[in-house]
Amino acid sequence: MKGIDRITSRILADAEAECAALKKESDARIEAIRAENEKRAQDEYWRLVREGVKDTEQRVQRMDRTARLEAKKSVLNMKQDAVTRAFELAKGKVAELPERDYVAFLAREAAAAAITGQEEVVFCERDRAAVGAKAVKAANEALAAKGMPAALTLSDETREMAGGLILKQGDIEVNCTVDTLLDLARGELAARVAQVLFED
């Protein structure tokens, strides 16, 4: 019996040794797999962090560009509004000119726009009553000085306008209203007005 016990003990010891070796090998493989997985997880983590940082930087840059564009548009709109207000103020200033200066302005415009020198001069109701005859007389004097026919007449007709005049001969009209003159001058003067308004 002792021989069987020894053989059994020996088999058991060998089996335990083999189990211990297998467990040690298994633990080493598990540890290697765990280390590899941790390395992969770390690599993936840092890849995602780098991608996130890059994506965030790109988004911040896009937002910055968009904000700058919006700011430029706002400033441009503000400048355009200010130029528009300046032209509206100019329109009001023309209407508020002293009578002598306003008559000279109207006469100058009528004489410059006259083609035949025989047109009717149409004013708004207020201007016709206040300065119409004086402006037509001064315009005829200016035409005569240039050697042109000087037969402009004050029209009985009046029109709705902020100021200025319309020269009319038959169906042909030349619009010299303050609104039209400012609109025509705006393209040429807007840049200069903006420069004066927004000089550093």
Image (cartoon, rainbow, N blue to C red):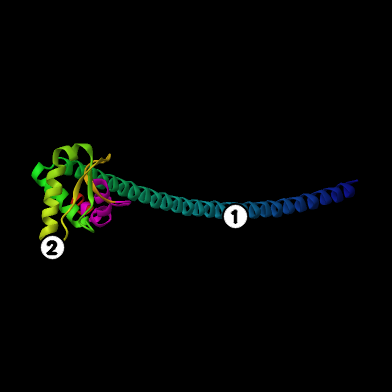
In the image, farthest residue toward the bottom: 147
In the image, residue 116 above or below residue 182: below
Image check: 139 left or right of 188? left
Spatial CA span between label 2 and label 1: 98 Å
Instruction: Tell me the mark number nearer the camera, choosing from 2 and 1.
Output: 2
The reply to whether residue 200 is visible in this rendering is no
In the image, farthest residue toward the right: 1
Q: Which residue is drawn at 16% across and 43% down?
A: 132
| Closer to us: 7 or 12 | 12
Three-letter amino acid code of the residue under disc 2? Gly
Numbered badge on residue 147? 2
Three-letter amino acid code of the residue under disc 1? Arg
Q: Which residue is drawn at 39% across and 52% down?
A: 65
Q: Mark 1 points at which residue?
A: 40
* Spot occupied by residue 55 in the image (x, y as percentages of width and height): 48, 52
The reply to whether residue 5 is visible in this rendering is yes
| Label 2: which secondary element | loop
Q: Which comes before the other along the chain, label 2 or label 1?
A: 1
Bounds of the magenta segment: 170-193
Q: Few, some or many C-alpha atoms within 10 Å of disc 2 (few <14, some 14-19, many ≥20)? A: few
* Spot occupied by residue 136 in the image (x, y as percentages of width and height): 15, 48
